[in-house]
Amino acid sequence: MTAAPVSMAEATLEDVRSYWDRRPCNIRHSTKPVGSREYFDEVEARKYHVEYHIPGFAEFPRWAGKRVLEIGCGIGTDAVNFARAGAEYTGTDLSEESLKLTRQRFAVYGLKGRLLAANGERVAEALPGEQFDLVYSFGVIHHTPDPGAVVAEVRRLIKPTGEFRLMVYARDSWKDIMIRAGLDQPEAQSGCPIAFTYSHAEARALLKGFRVVEMRNEHIFPYVIEKYVRHEYEVQPWFRAMPEAMFKALEATLGWHLCIRAVPA
């Protein structure tokens, strides 16, 4: 079973690196001077306002004193929260521009962590002989040419008692329906080289060497885009008309984020 790409273009790892170097994910979540404490505070507040399910999925406090590896740390929002919670944190990313901001973010908050430039498809080479209690990758591996290679690397790096928590894009989702109708795109910026989507069955097939213990759909973006980019949070009228329980039920069925917890088989 093969995942379906949102972008059909033949893309290389260098295309992916270049795309995220040009505009690291969430870099426009604040209008404050980039790299300032105020900037990072706003980035975090906006991210968790819109993607409010992330802290519950990551369970940052659970990993205090544990070895955590994040594949695709981006500009470091989840990274700093693992570190604040007391995890022994290692973050990797393909994008050097993203890593620059994450290093600056750790410095601004006085946090400890190890940050490495690494290709997720060969990440074990950057961490020879190491194993982790948690490998975490939120919204990342569906952007690489060979997601299965990343999963194989995670299997090498995870402790027998460890856990793999990841998010990949959901095939059966409101967002994917809109993309295929030509009414949306996978990322805020256009031209994303690769964005695979997965059904539940395809996600299970991807996770070779793991046993899935939880898989759920989360997150439908409800805001008017033209106002959201101005940091105004007006809900689209068709979502605004829904009772909250109805919207939650829609997210649980057609959410764009397929959140998965898995353990070594």
Image (cartoon, helix red, strand yellow):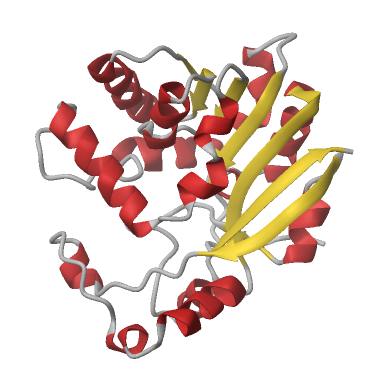
Q: Is residue 7 above or below residue 245?
A: above
For the view shown, which residue lies furthest in the top direction? 129
Q: Is residue 139 above or below residue 254?
A: above
In the image, what residue occupies the spot 39% across and 88% down?
A: 242
- Residue extending furthest toward the right: 265
Residue 11 screen position, x and y as percent: 54, 48
Most foreground residue, 19 or 221: 221
**In the depicted structure, whether residue 77 falls above or below residue 123:** below
Residue 259, position as x, y percentages in the image: 61, 54
Asked whether residue 172 appears in the rendered view, the answer is: yes
Question: Residue 199: x and y, percent?
Answer: 71, 67
- Is residue 142 found left or right of 77 in the rendered image? right
Q: On the image, which quarter does residue 98 sit in? A: top left
**Residue 79, quarter of picture:** top left
Left or right of 86? Residue 258 is right
As drawn, 180 above or below 150: below
Task: Give the mark count.
Answer: 0
Quarter containing the N terminus: bottom right
The structure residue drawn at horizontal position 54% and vertical position 56%, both measured from the top left corner, is: 195
Tell me where residue 103 appears, x and y as whole percent. Answer: 33, 18
Q: Is residue 250 left or right of residue 122?
A: left
Q: Residue at x 65, y 13 (%)?
A: 127
* Image point (52%, 48%), residue name: 56
Q: Quadrant of the C terminus?
A: top right
Q: Can residue 5 be seen from the camera position used here?
A: no
